[in-house]
Amino acid sequence: MPEHLLLETRERVGLIRINRPQRMNALNNDVAREICDALFAFDADPAIGCMVITGNEKAFAAGADIGAMAEWDYAKVYGDDYITAEWEGIRRVRKPVIAAVAGYALGGGCELAMACDIIVAADSARFGQPEITIGTMPGFGGTQRLPRAVGKAKAMEWCLTGRMIGADEAERAGLVARVVPAADLEREAIATAAKIASFSLPVVMKIKEAINRAFESSLTDGLAFERREFHSTFALDDRKEGMRAFVEKRMPQFRNR
């Protein structure tokens, strides 16, 4: 069992709760490794169709564990391949991952949320990349995913000032999908995950892959990729079932094949 996480399943949803309340859910290599291991396990489980990562009402993750990093030097972080070795596994997860964010999501916590596919934020959520205030810079995608989400101007301001961003501003900027009352956060995030998990899993994974491809290819290449993936759905039993159900005016019974 992981030391720093609480794991649950809610029907076809896998729930990962970061559980370091004494450190405001600060992230380190052990926590990152446990998160990736849990994601990989849910990803491999045919009974799971979507995952949710959350924290507690005070913090999703208040950043990386600065106390552990304070005395490190270049030789150590380069030699250890810090972040790349333990944190980047989330990029290999094929099923959708939702970040349910309440309280602080700062530094590595904001970057972890951005590495997920959808962010649902409580009205209490606070985002930011404050690394500049301690003499360093984002290292888990803050300068790369943030501009793709909110544009160059806002990413520059947020990263260069370290300003903390409220949930409403984050939603207006496009960082989060939607904001909900804090008391409803977990329920709403799990309901969204359950909705996704109710659809054909192969199609869900194809859509995730196609949208991610949009950020790493030209429009022409992206459209060609989308078209091939769309055509490939015509090999699926679920595509036949979904269209037949529509014609017959009934709910489809997807079998994930």
Image (tube, helix red, strand yellow):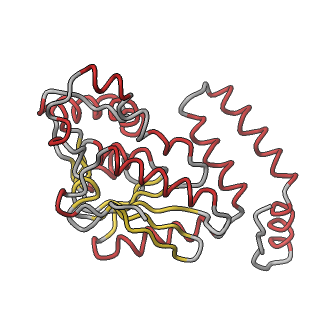
Where does residue 241 sit, x and y in percent of width and height? 84, 68
Residue 36 drawn above or below residue 148 = below
The residue at the point 14 percent across, 34 percent down is 70
Q: Is residue 54 left or right of residue 14?
A: left
As drawn, the residue found furthest toward the top would be: 75
Residue 73 placement: quadrant: top left
The image shows a total of numbered marks equal to 0
Which quadrant of the figure contains the N terminus? Answer: bottom left
Query: Residue 76 location, x and y as percent?
Result: 28, 25
Q: Position of residue 160 (x, y in %)?
A: 19, 29
Identity of the residue drawn at 59% across and 42% down: 211
Pick the residue in front: 189 or 166: 189
Q: Is residue 60 left or right of residue 33?
A: left
Q: 33 above or below 197?
A: above
Whether 244 is drawn above or below 26: the answer is: below
Q: Position of residue 94 (x, y in %)?
A: 61, 49
In the depicted view, which residue is nearer to us: 129 or 78? 78
The quadrant of the picture occupied by the C terminus is: bottom right
Extreme residue in the bottom direction:
250
In the foreground, 168 or 35 = 35
Residue name at image x 72 percent, y 34 percent: 225
